Amino acid sequence: MIHHISVSAKNPQHVAQVLAKVLKGQLAPFPPHPGSYIVFPGDEYGTAVEVYPLGSEILPGTAPNEQCKFVNSDNPSSFTATHAAISVSVTQEEIEQIGMSEGWRVVRCNRDSLFDVIEFWVENRLMIELLTPEMASQYLAFTKQPEKLQEFFATAT
C-alpha cells in the first residue's frame, strides 16, 4: 500500500493547489522542507502528495541512526521518471477542465488494452496518471488477478 508520494515542481504551492482540486483535498505547507506543500484527500488510506521545489533531493543520513535530509540541486532536469497512478472521484471532463485552465497537457490513454488512464502533465513536465472511478475499476480488475499479471509480464518480455 502506498500512502504518500513526493514530487517536485517549479511552483510547488500552485501545483499543490491544483492537485487539491483534482483530489478534492486540502493542502498545507510541509514544514520538514521549506517551500514545500502537502495535499491530503482525506481518504481511508491516509493518501498524500508532497510537492517539493524543483531541484529537491533527499539524501541518506551520514551517521548510523541519522535520518534523511533535504538538499537542493542547482541543475535539476525538467523531467523525471517518477510518476503515480491515483484514483480520483472527479470525472474526465472535470480533469480536462482543470488541466485546460492551467495550460497543462491532459490525454486519455489506454494501457495495453488492459485499462485506461488520464495522463495529467503537471507543469507540462511531470506525468500523473489519474483514474476516474470507471478507470480504477478496470485497473483493479487487472491487478487483483495474479494469474493475469503473471501471464501479462511473462509475454511482455
Image: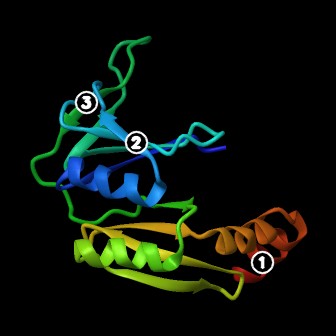
Q: Which residue in the protein does label 1 denote?
A: 152
Q: Residue at x 50, y 84 (%)?
A: 108
Q: Report the amino acid beneath label 2.
A: Gln
Q: Nearer the viewer, mark 3 or mark 2?
A: 2
Cα separation between marks 1 and 2: 37 Å
Label located before the other in sequence (1 or 2): 2
Residue 141 pos. (x, y %):
81, 70
Vertical placement of residue 10 versus 62, above or below: below
Q: Residues within 10 Å of mark 2 (few under 14, many from 20)?
A: some
Residue holding disc 3: 33
What is the C-alpha distance between the residues marked 3 and 1?
Answer: 40 Å
The C terminus: image quadrant: bottom right
Q: Which residue is mark 2?
A: 26
* Snapshot colouring: rainbow
Dot 3 lies on which element? loop
- Tag 3 and tag 2, C-beta contact below 8 Å: no
Is residue 125 shown left or right of residue 140?
A: left
Q: Nearer the viewer, residue 87 or 76?
A: 87
Q: Position of residue 15 (x, y in %)?
A: 27, 55
Q: Tag 1, which secondary structure?
A: helix
**Residue 14 image point, x, y percent:** 22, 53
